[in-house]
Image (cartoon, helix red, strand yellow):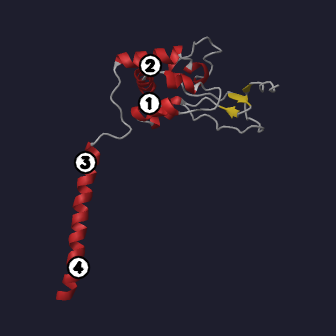
Amino acid sequence: MNSLLRRVAPLAAAAALLAAASTAWYAQAEAAPDAKSSPAPDAKSVERGRYLARIAGCNDCHTPGYAENGGKVDEKLWLTGDRLGWQGPWGTTYPSNLRLVLAKYSENQWVQVAKSAQYRPPMPWFALHDMTEADLRAFYRFVRWLGPAGEPAPAYVAPGRAAAGPVVAFPSPPAAK
């Protein structure tokens, strides 16, 4: 019995220590803000983000029917992506649902991605690079204020493959002379 106790005692102590550490970690994790959380947006930054979505052309592609209806689309549909493809030598791309995409990022992650990403045409990723950090943060806060909605955009279609729905076709550039 004494030898059994000597073998079990260290295991019991280790289990108790592990349980205490797990409880402390869990309590700390519950109290800490989520890594993806961001400060609550203030009215001024939300309004600035709304303004940027309008004037930067984000809605033109990322909101269904926005350009065709002269911008007269209910805000609840803004930035939910589109099934209209953009086809060219790069293949077929679709405007992503920014409300779902940005819901996956923290504000700091969004700024980092916006400042460094290079997307396929016709997305003007270089315009994101030129935006100020304050404007990128305001846009993020507006999109997060809108909340998640809609469905993910269709997947990219490689060059030479048929797109499932309607597309805007860009001609190939003229051959170099």
The answer to whether residue 1 shows anywhere in this view is no
Q: Quadrant of the N terminus?
A: bottom left
Residue 125 percent across, percent down from the top left: 56, 27
Q: Earlier in the sequence, mark 3 or mark 1?
A: 3
Q: Residue at x 23, y 54 (%)?
A: 24
Q: Residues within 10 Å of mark 4 (few under 14, many from 20)?
A: few
Q: CA distance from mark 4 to mark 2?
A: 62 Å
Tell me the distance, in whole angstroms, between the alpha carbons under discs 1 and 4: 53 Å
Which element carries disc 4, helix, strand or loop?
Answer: helix
Q: Is residue 108 left or right of residue 1?
A: right
The amino acid type, in three-letter code, at marker 3 is Gln
Residue 52 position, x and y percent, is: 48, 17
Query: Quarter of the image containing the C terminus?
Result: top right
Q: Amino acid at mark 1?
A: Val
Q: Which residue is mark 3?
A: 28
Q: Which residue is mark 2?
A: 49
Local secondary structure at mark 2: helix
In this rendering, the label closer to the viewer, 1 or 4: 1
Q: Secondary structure at mark 1?
A: helix
Q: Secondary structure at mark 3?
A: helix
At a point 28% along the width and 42% down the height, the residue shown is 32
User: Which amino acid is tagged 4?
Assistant: Val
The mark that comes first in sequence, 3 or 4, is 4
> Which residue is labeled 4 in the image?
8
